[in-house]
Image (spheres, rainbow, N blue to C red):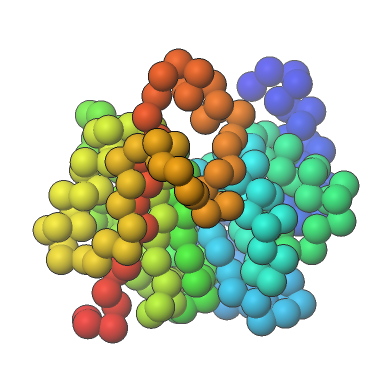
Amino acid sequence: MSKGKLAKFAETKTFDNFFEPTRNEVVEGHFALKGRWHEYFGNKHPIVLELCCGRGEYTVGQAQLFPDKNFIGMDRKGARMWKGCRQSIDEGMKNVAFLRGYIDYVNFCFDKDEVSEIWITFPDPQPQKPRKRMTAPVFLDRYRQILHDEGSIHLKTDSELMYNFTLEVINEQQLTILENIDNLYALDYLADNLKIKTYYENMWLAQGATIRYINFSLNKKQL
């Protein structure tokens, strides 16, 4: 890690809205915020979880649009989240938090039905490792443990591989597609939260990338 990233990571650790439980804390059930995230936020507003949040631009962007919801960005690289932590603190935002950890353990960080929506924004498509893709069945099983019955999963990706793979999993598991857009910015109208563009998304768009979006339900009530 470069000196600049090390400095940012060190500062990130001092932020009140940044949490970094150890693996043992999480797996052994000692993470104090599991099942108590509403106590941290000080309200009962719905909790929206963004996975692979990177610099936190999407987490902060949505939190600005929806002050009546709480947003948590999760990523394994703490230095990346410095920007979102810093911005949300500077702007006095009380509905934003960031969690450093591996997505493999997401079901140990939140309690049953604690999350109302999950956003997966531009995940690594893992070309050689389909089981590690963020919409693979093993990950959907983890999401089922924390997502509310009425909740849904949003995928935003520039990867055709990730997009087609997700559609295949949805079909195999007989899940419900709520919205499916194979070229997001070709539409004349977009919801405000779909217009949010991160730094890297703008780079990919400049290179001619096509952005795809799927919103689907896990059909938990039918289980």
- Residue 36 in sight: yes
* Quadrant location of the C terminus in the rendered image: bottom left
Q: Is residue 199 above or below residue 136?
A: above
Q: Is residue 178 left or right of residue 62?
A: left
* Spot occupied by residue 184 in the image (x, y as percentages of width and height): 40, 41
Which residue lies at the image location 35% right of the left edge and 37% below the top edge? 183
Q: Residue furthest front?
A: 188
* Spot occupied by residue 92 in the image (x, y as percentages of width and height): 87, 56
Q: Is residue 27 left or right of residue 81?
A: left
Q: Quadrant of residue 212?
A: top left
Q: Is residue 176 above or below residue 10?
A: below
Q: Is residue 180 left or right of residue 170?
A: right
Q: How many marks?
A: 0
Which residue lies at the image location 65% right of the left edge and 69% below the top edge? 69
Q: Quadrant of residue 1?
A: top right
Which residue lies at the image location 56% right of the left edge and 52% below the top edge? 193
Looking at the image, which is closer to me, 56 or 129?
Answer: 56
